[in-house]
Each structure stands twice: as C-alpha cells, then as structure tokens.
Image (cartoon, grey):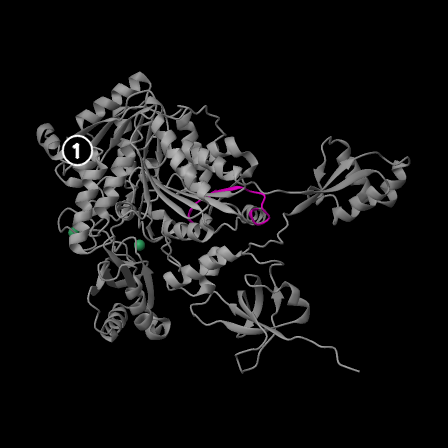
Amino acid sequence: MHRLFSVVMFADVAFPISSYQTFTYEIPGDFLPHIKIGVRVRAPLGRRIVQGIVVAKHKTAQYRGKIRPLAAIVDDQPVLDQGLWQLMQWISQYYLTPIGQVAKTALPKGLSTRYQPPTQWLVRFRAFPADRERMERRAPAQSKILKHLETREEPIPVSELGLLAASPLTVCRSLAEKGFVELFEEVRLPDVTGFTFDPVHKEILFSKIQKSILSDLISGLKAKSFQPFLLHGVTGSGKTEIYIELAQQALNQNRTVILLLPEISLTPQIAGRFRAVFGEAVALWHSKLSPAARAWTWKRICSGDFKVVIGARSAIFAPIKDLGLIVVDEEQEHTYKQESPAPRYHARDVALMRGKIHQATVVLASATPSLESYYNQNLGKLKYLHLPERFGGARYPHVHIVNMEQEQEESGKPGQVLSGLLLEKIEDRLTKKEQIILLQNRRGYAPILRCGDCGEIEMCPNCQVTLTYHRVGNNLRCHFCAFTRPSIPQQCRNCQSPNLKLFGVGTQKVEDLILETFPRARLARLDMDTAHSGTALTEILEQFARREIDILLGTQMIAKGLDFGNATLVGIINGDTGLFLPDFRSGERVFQLIYQAAGRAGRHRKPGEVVVQTYNPDNPVIKYATRLDVKKYYNIALSERQELNYPPFSWMVKVEFNGKKKTNVEQKATIVRRSLPRPYKGLEILGPAFCYRERLGGRYRMQIVFKSSKTVDPNGTKLHHYLRQNLGPEKLGRNRGGVNVFLDIDPYSLL
Ligand SMILES: [Zn+2]
Ligand SMILES: [Zn+2]
C-alpha cells in the first residue's frame, strides 16, 4: 500500500500595504488548479482577512515560521496577463511603490471576473381562477396581487408588490405554478452610457498633410513593434478623425485600442464620435461610473467584449487583450498624473511603457505638448508629426491683447474687469446670434476678503490659503479642503473694523457683470460649483451645442477639447491667473491654457476672434501664447529649464513630509535630510523647506527636492539607486509624531 501522494504548494501574496514584503501561504488542495500568478486571493494578515494578489508560486517555502493557508480565491482566472503584470512591476520599481499598492490602483476594489449584474423578478397577469371568491377567502394575498396586476398591461417588478403581501415573490411563485401569472427574471444592466453626446456621423475627407501623417502612423501600427509618436496638431486640426481612422486600422489587425482623455466628462464629443463609428465595441472607463457599471464594464473588458476602451487616467490599466494602439489625447494635462494615493504615476509615461511591453503604437497628441514630450521629440525619442493646418478650411482666430493697466488709466475705473473691447465684441456676437466663450480660471465670487483698515485677510483655518467668497450660498469657502464659513463676518477679527472688502474676481462675479451689461443674454456658468455632477455638465454642454446658451463662462474646464462651430469669440478675462505661482511649471501651464482656450474660437467656417486681457502684455508667456507661437515660447521655456536644471533636463523627485504639528514635521524633515549621504556629482538636493501651500487640510507640509542632471544620469538610474539606498521604507522609519512621508517621482508641481 502506498499513501496518496499529496503536493503541498505555497503562494506568495502581496497586499496593498506600504511594505515591499510579500507573505507566504499554503495553497489548500482544492484551490490548487486556480492559483496562478495574478489571481486575487483573500488571506489572513495579522488578525484580519485581507485581499491580496498572488505574485509567486513554489513548492518549498522560504519562510520558516508558521504558514497559514489561503482563505479564499477572488478570481477564477488571473486578472492580469503577462504584459499587465510586467507593467505593474515596472510601476512598482519606477515609482518606488509596493506591488500590493500598485495592484490596488490597477485593480480597484469591487472588480471581479465573476461579477453578475443584479437581476429582478417581473410578473405579468394572465388569468383569474374560475372561482375567484374561493381564492379571496382561502388565499387573500394571492387574490390582492392578482387584482392589482389585472389593471396593468406591462410586467411589473415583484419588488413593487411589497405593500400587498409580506413576501410577494413567494405569492407570485404560487400564482405562477397555477398559471395565473407569468413570472420571469430579468437582468438589470447598469447604465454605462454617461458622458457621450449622441453619436455624430461625419463624412471625412482628409487633407494631403493629414493623409501623410496617417500613413506614417499606419506604418507604425503595421510594424507591430513599439512605435512612440508625438502628434503636434493645432486645435481644430482634426486629430479626433485621425484617432478614429487609426483605431479602425488597429481593429482590422485584430488588435485593440486604449484612448486616454484628460477628463472624460469634458470631452463627451470625442466619445460620441467613437460610438458613432465603433458602436458597442466601445467601453467608457472613468471614475464617475456607478459601482455596478464599473464592475460590469470591467468584466466585459476582461472577456474581450470591447475593442476600444476610452477613459481617463486609470483606463491605462484596462485588462484589454491584444493591445495595438494607445492614444493619449492632450498629453500635457495634469490630470494624467495621480497625486494621491501611491503609486503617483503619470499615465502618459505608463502608456509609453505599456506600449513597449505590448509592442504597440503609442500616440501622444496635443496642440500644446508638455515640455517633456517636446524635448523628447527634439532628441528623437518620439517621432514628431506636425499638423499645422486647421481642419476643413477653418482659419486661425485673430487675437487681440488688451493691456488692462492702460485700459483702467484711460477709463478712470480702477479694478475694471471687462474691457471696452471685450464688451463691444460680446455685443457684436449677441446681435449676430453667434456664441461666446469666456474663460476666468477662478471660481467663486471673489477670492479675497480683506479688512480695509488693517489689511487682515480671511484665511482658511486648515490651509495656508485665502477663503473665497461665494455669492451662491453667501459663504466663504476654502478651495483646498471642505472648510466653509457659513456667513460673512461683520467685522475684522483683528481690529474689529466693519470695513471689510472683497477683492479679486471669480466666475460668479464675471457672471454678474456680464448680466448687468447684457441682461437678456443667456449665460451658463461652468465650474466645479455648477458641474458637481456629470449629467449637469453634459447638459450644459449640450445646451450650448444646441445654441440655447449665448455665453458659456467657466474655468479651465471650458478650455479643453470642446468643439462648437458657432462659437466665434473667446474672451480670456485674466490671462495672468497663475502666472506668478512659484513653480517651475507655472509659465508652461498658463501658456497652454491661453493657447487652448484661444483654439475654441472659430473652429469651423466662421472666423474666430480672441480677446486676452492682461496686466503683463510683455511677459513672454502671454506674448507668445497670444501670438499662438508654440515653438518660440517652448524654446524660451526650455532654455530657462536648462539653466535651472529642471525637467526635462534633470530627473526630479520630491519627498513630502506632512503632519498636524509643525515642529514634528520640521524635525522629521531635518533628521531625514541630515541622514542623507553626500550627493553624487550632478545631484542637487534642495530643502527641507515649507511648501508654497504650507498648510493644507490642517497638515503642515515640507519638502526636500532632488534634481539629478541628465548629463550625468541619463536614465535616472543613479537617482533611483540613491533614493532606494537612503529613503526606502526602512530608512524613513515609522510614522512617528504623526508625520507622513512620501516620495513623488516626477512631481507635476512643487506647490
Ligand atoms: Zn482689520
Ligand atoms: Zn482649507
């Protein structure tokens, strides 16, 4: 007799905790066939049962302590293919984030290949029994329900019969058995159609230059190898049409497509165009999907039902098979960078890596590329394709600059918000029934409430920022945390003077001023206060598209990819907003915003005009943005960055310390800084210093910034090595004194 041979196998599991450690478990026999790398499991961790992901499988356990068995399997097949798994490992290494935390971002909670959409029971009347009275006496609940159903033609949900019987489903079942009703179960598919305009079919005739760009891109696709492109196309040059044609080509090769958009809710038109061409093969993936819609979409992506995934940042992790093409639209947008939690990844850079792993074509597209991408095409790392023409014969807008200092001197109205020229142009468009877009990149009514006597300013008690007055709701609000002061103080907290004054201009104030001058204009304001829900937003955009709104006023939200043929005037109320923020990217951001907003004017046959109001007409950012001269400004900006050794000339990493007690934060930052060994040649370490926004959400913030020059560290490996050696989790120590420490690789800003 020999004993049954039983194999004991072990699995290493990574959990979403801030440790690079993995944990070993025994695989129970009946789990064995299902445990593969990339399968999610539940396992005991300390006293809890926690979900993790299997990262390795082996026959002998390295760990010598007590090994516990896995508790449950979440997926019946790996949720990651080899390529996605490789991508997650790269993210873990590059962004110095434990793989379990990467898994948590790439595979958010509530997603499972086993997901089934909820069902509901429906019931429909068929007939009464021959002896109705007998039923009334013997089975009053059945009788009541039958009477209720008799009047209804359509089947109704059993759940609606709760008032007629304690357990209506049981009653309906007995009725169905006797043939008096028809009872059936129906799957309730979640609504996944949000954020698309109705599909628009367009006849496309490509210009010569578009054809030549397309043929370059298509040969890239045909090569079936990693092909990164930078498509620099001015706004209105027909980039969407190129994406669609290219996606069609990928589908013809039996490959799939991911299209990343900076913010899907702001670009319903692009999603609508894709739906028109590819119909049901298109999945939308974004944070505003309901949990059910999210789970349902994800499952169907896994099973290969979709060929095109359109979404915001996290769509780059879509588990789509046979990926052939990734398009990153408006690749310069800051929304591609995840600020919190870790991994603080940049979806554009992850897209390039995923393209490399899958041998796919990656198209970074923009009218105003990021300086990084612009620089990379200079170096030849990205193939540069330039679309200088506007599409379909549309012309560039004519840009007027208004020097507001001069304007106010001449008009004798200090603090004047709307220039004579802008008002004149608005009136002109209103009479011609053409539409107007106004950009004021600040929401609320006025960003500052100041004492007229002592100068005291109302600040947020949790953050180092001023409170903004909101006329809607008549309160003061912090735009960084949820703090709200329900009413306006009657007197200064410092000198008790009642002489409090509002300064500065937000969208609500512009709205008032416009309506004072043009009381009959139909104006809609689009900012984070009015666009609280996705439907509210799509609704406003659709109304504007239907020309039921004359003036669309908003923050940067309106500067994105919107395409409205009848909007022939764009007014930028204050072109200087954000210009003087102490951040290496502030100039680039303001340039991109003005350029993009200007691009909203006259996108079709009608010529457009742009009015930019500024106090700094000679500032190179303003000057070249209003001349729509990308090259000139980018060359200036690049030489400034080079001089100061900022990206793209260096690799930059920020270490942030934050906590409620200022002294603890300072102490921790100082200790960490002192513990760092001498930097290698080419590494610059700045700080610790308090961040520009010294306090946010009640936490003090300090940072140490590392800049490693690319001349000595071309691939960033030296800096990575230095950080791993000196700022790994074991070096940073535990969270003593309530101070959080985190690393931000390639930070978007240093504010
Ligand atoms: Zn005062
Ligand atoms: Zn605050």
Q: Nearer the viewer, residue 15 or 245?
A: 245
Q: Nearer the viewer, residue 664 or 461?
A: 664
| Amino acid under disc 1 | Gln
Q: Nearer the viewer, residue 640 or 376?
A: 376
* Location of the C terminus (image quadrant): bottom left
Residue 657 appears at what percent x and percent y? 29, 65
Residue 633: in magenta span: no
Left or right? Give the position of 481 relative to 47: left
In the rendered image, which quarter is residue 110 located in? bottom right
Left or right? Give the position of 290 relative to 458: right
* Location of the N terminus (image quadrant): bottom right
To which residue does mark 1 refer?
Answer: 416
In the rendered image, which quarter is residue 402 located in? top left
Tell me the magenta residue range: 301-313
Q: Residue furthest top?
A: 432
Residue 665 in view of the camera: yes
In the rendered image, which quarter is residue 661 located in? bottom left
In what quadrant does ligand 2 lie? Answer: bottom left
Residue 311: in magenta span: yes
In the image, is residue 563 above or below residue 749?
above
In the image, is residue 304 above or below residue 734?
above
Residue 208 appears at what percent x and percent y? 35, 26
In the image, is residue 241 above or below residue 497?
above
Left or right? Give the position of 450 relative to 209: left
Residue 314 appears at what percent x and percent y? 44, 50
